[in-house]
Image (spheres, rainbow, N blue to C red):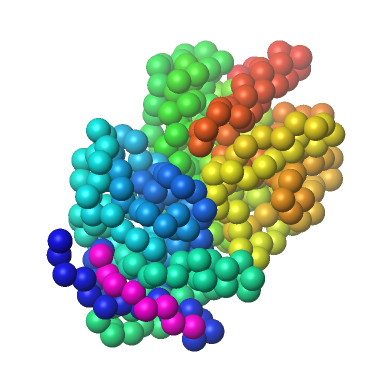
Amino acid sequence: MASKKKAKLILKDGTIFMGESFGTPKSVSGEVVFATGMVGYPEALTDPSFRGQILVLTYPLVGSYGVPKKEFWESNKIQILGLIVCNYIDTPSHHASQKTLRNWLKEEGIPAIEIKDTRALTQKLRDEGVSLGKIVINDKDILFEDPNLRNLVAEVSSKEILEYGEIDKTGNRTIVLIDCGLKQNILRLLILRGLRVYLVPFDTDVTKLNFSFMAVVISNGPGDPRQVKTTIKNVKKMIAKKIPTLGICLGNQILTLAGGGTTYKLKFGHRSQNQPVVLSGSKKCYLTTQNHGFVVKKIPEDFKEWFYNANDNTNEGIIHKSLPFMSVQFHPESSPGPLDTDWVFDFFFKKAKSYHKKNNRKI
């Protein structure tokens, strides 16, 4: 095993956690957040919603099943700024493993450190809220930087329109997917449903596209939703033209802001595979995967709450009272266990098709 370099995590309030480096030996600065999943680190590390963040994994053993092929990742590279774990395992055992986590981190230039008390660190972030922080290796100090002041979506979004799925000349099976920092499994499940998908950059005005489509899906993504002003402005146009729209995670917040609602930042966010979400007006509770630091505060006029979080009662989705506009704060495409909320996609597409048929709308 390679020798480890001394490293430290320094929070904005001056708290220092000593550790040892096992990734790329460089110093970075961003927002320190934690995720409580027991598995899924390859998916988490490649999730664009973690852009600009130093991720603390609370499960005490990380690396034990290595890294799978890129086709199983949520994007084509590691998106986190840095990684904090309690114990790194350098001897993975899994039939799908292609390389060790250490080698992957070094290949992609990502720093990572082991600190022995991730429990104390996580408790601090829960009690006091997420914090700006920096990983400092070899005493190469750097300034604190707040990633939420940047338009992180612009950094992770596709730069061109991409096409997926079988050709659809009618437009009845065609959808537009606005890439705000897309998790690839959203795209996989849409293609699996036989849809023709046009993946477009975050700042695309879909009302000006020169092809027919049935509906629009707004993806997840990183950062403060209020930074994505162009997307919000374009979604307002979609609402005005009554184009069926489904938002996921950041897409929930963008639809809210476009409709006249408001958002705010949570104390420590929802980043786990076991967030309980209740369907409003029922006793149905779903197991969901989530990764977000911002949430809906004021629900827009003509919308109502669709889901809420059973832990803290925060909003988990909105739905229009009469038109096919809806969004969820969780990830219906993720499957931490049962396929609890996969039905959201089919519900939306059924509503979209019904709306077009009822109103004799030409697609």
Q: Main secondary structure of the magenta part?
A: strand
Residue 112 visible in the current orientation = yes
| Residue 173: in magenta span | no
Residue 248 in view here: no
Magenta-colored span: 15-22
Q: Nearer the viewer, residue 27 or 97?
A: 97
Q: Position of residue 202 (x, y in %)?
A: 50, 47
Question: Where residue 71 sits: x, y (%)?
Answer: 31, 34
Q: Considering only vertical position in the picture, is 273 above or below 345? A: below
Q: Position of residue 108 (x, y in %)?
A: 25, 57
* Figure quadrant of residue 324: top right
For the point 61% across and 63% down, the residue is 268
For the point 80% across and 32% down, which residue is it? 283
Measuring 34% from the left and 74% from the top, which residue is drawn there?
A: 19
Q: How many marks?
A: 0
Q: Is residue 170 depicted above or below 162 in this figure?
A: above
